[in-house]
Image (cartoon, coloured by chain):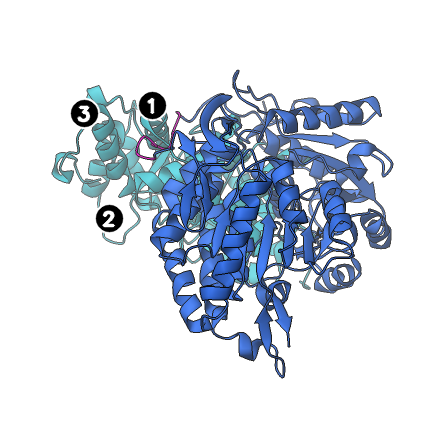
Chain colours: A blue, B cyan
Amino acid sequence: MSKKRPAKKTAFTTGVAVLAPPTHGELIPQRDRVLRFGGRWNYSPAPEVHTDVKVHPRYELFIGGKFVKPSSGKYFPSINPATEKQLSEVALGNAADVDRAVKAARRAYEKTWGKMPGRERAKYLFRIARLLQEKIRDLAVLESLDGGKTIRESRNIDLPLVAAHFFYHAGWADKLDYAFPGRKPQPLGVAGQIIPWNFPLLMAAWKLAPALACGNTCVLKPAETTSITAMHLAEILAEADLPEGVVNIVTGFGDTGAAIVNHPDIDKLAFTGSTEVGKLIAKSVAGTRKKLTLELGGKAANIICEDAPIDQAIEGIIQGIYFNQGHVCCAGSRLFVQESVVEPVIRRLRNRLNVLRVGDPLDKNTDIGAINSRQQLDKIREMVDSGKKEGAELFQPACRLPSKGYYYAPSFFTGVTDSHRIAQEEIFGPVLSVMTFRTPEEALERANNTPYGLSAGVWTDKGSKVFKLATKLRAGVVWAETYNKFDPASPFGGYKESGFGREGGKQGLLAYLRLG
Amino acid sequence: MTRQSPSFGRVDQIMVEERAATFTKRSIKTESKLQGLRLAFSMLDLTTLEGRDTPGKVMTLCHKAMHPAPERYGVGPVAAVCVYPKLVPAAKAFLRGSTVKVAAVATYFPSGQSSMKTKMEDTRVALQAGADEIDMVIDRAAFLRGEYGRVHDEIAAVKELCGDVHLKVILETGELITYDNVRAASMVAMQAGADFIKTSTGKVSPAATLPVTLVMLDAIREFFFATGRRIGMKPAGGIRTAKQALQYLVMVNETLGDDWLTPDMFRLGASTLANDILLQIAKSVDGRYQSGDYFSLP
């Protein structure tokens, strides 16, 4: 091959495309311009050692400060989704147990917690936060074992945020009188709280910390597939000497949740979960004195403009949809890419998916862990099938999934239109729908054309464009040049069918206060 | 020359730093660690660039480059030694018959603050002495003034002089201020004829960092898809520990992949790093740490 090249003394004009191609080095023809991965150097397994973390063989209910047997005497299995093996068994709480829990909460509200000065409540919350922080590693392992999320995320994201939420709200407990000038905030009473399985402990923290800081007592129901860490949290609450009955945890299925929703002595309901169930709850609560906040589904638009920093936008897309196996209500599941950069974005996305590591959630190098349950895996498969049937083109990297356990390869669809089911319905899995747009105005209109309105993302190097789009996107959270960033000080919540009420920040306190 | 504003693509500082940090979170253990350490060692440009360098010092370096450790550790020679032009004849003599290449810094290294004539002459001296690779510096002053054309033409002229000899273009990212500038400089250098792009001279702080290297790797990937040419990458300076070296390897492994994971396409410019890698290899093989005194100074 000839290496002789003429001196190229052209004045530099505008970017790569207009310059003469260089003549040095080997020229790779267009069709062979591919990147190859994993052929030279592979990472050995790096499992988190967890033999010291004890999973109890059985978990009871936590009512009135004690661990008690369910009145049904029944227990249901909790499965490790990474292995499909039973991890433990969990008490099946029924309406009678819920009634016991609500009574305990009412007693605690009237006797201790509701009357306690804010500065005293703060001490308990700070203590809980510190205990959580000390146990981050153990709790992260349990969270990964029970829910299938990667240890990388449970240890570096979930658990630090859990502790942060308690710290943040501990700080509010004695300052409520100054938070809303001219008003006298009062607690509401007994709060019933029902949380989902995607961020089990984090959702418990989002619910409990503000409720407790504001002087309410709680009856919490974790999701049936991820109850275990909530019970370890109960142990921490007990260790922190939280007065009995201030927090009660009743495990079980939808019936147990319904018993909380319909209990007459509940003052406030907070639910995070599907829009379908949220609507049922709203109907049940209609006409009662119960206050309600809902944080429901989403189908967020992540908008990539042509002037965006593309390599970093790719990271935002990845964080947006493949974070926590896509089990994220604010996931950026609809990707809108401006026409002129579609080809480079798709190419990068393919390459990026090829280096995502799918597998054992407890391996420190795993990027995508196990799907939370068989039921969810079936739902993802059904949605992907519908996408294929409706003519969209599926891309999945060539990764080998473990033979046991619920796994799904990170995927994206191209050739998607707004009327595809995969562009309209929440998949709640690692599946992205890629669509294109010509003008930012068009992107805006289509991004807002959804019943949901939880979150959105904007990628452009132009600050003015960020503000222009962000103010017009009908979504509770809009991330610019980043995605899936959470902070206890930042209120989170939806527009439209993504729910109402905010969690986090000063706004989040309003969900648990009556402004006198 | 008037100021130009080419669209080389933009870099978002926060996200690129966040992404670079993720490569430090990979847990490289057992077999993969040993394999990675040996690979990193084979990619070293063992460097001495001091005013007090003598043929004697270069001899020590060259011997270390060829025979780094006892055979049982399975460590091959490094990729190259990197010296000033005046010491190229000594290095060539000591390395005769080995696979280790001789790289010479040139073009008024490290500042580049001289006439084009002097820079060319500097390069010619190194070439005539038999250097296999030239590490040139760009004119940062011209670049920061926006005279991309001048930067481009200087590199093109040096490359023309080099002919088949591999040209590494040092951007001195520590002086370029922004990631946008690093990306633009990478593009200009590759366009003008660089075989490798290199972060730093080692004389300016900060030298190589993970985010800067990531920006350059992204630019290399872009250039590859646009032109079909594979350009090499060399972070240099500030990489002192085996752990850091593995982080750089992880980054290459997960951005450009297999075709860049070779000494032909990726180099690490360092000196003290060599012994830390050897120490870790010895630990992996023997199961215990040795005293640093068991490894000769480079």
- Amino acid under label 3? Asp
Seen from the viewer's position, the closer of residues A113 and A361 is A113
Q: What's the residue at 79%, 27% (across, down)?
A: A387
Query: Label 2 lies in what chain?
Result: B
Report which residue position mark 1 lands on.
B31
Seen from the viewer's position, the closer of residues B263 and A263 is A263
Q: What's the residue at 15%, 39% (across, down)?
A: B292
- Amino acid under label 1? Glu
Q: Secondary structure at mark 3?
A: helix
Where residue A341 appears, x then y in whole percent? 75, 42
- Amino acid under label 2? Asp
- Give the mark nearer the N terminus: 3 vs 2: 2
Q: Which mark is residue B53?
A: 2
Q: Secondary structure at mark 2?
A: loop
Seen from the viewer's position, the closer of residues B139 and A348 is A348
**What predominant SS class does the magenta segment belong to?**
loop
Cα–Cα span, label 1 and label 3: 13 Å
Report which residue position mark 3 lands on.
B286
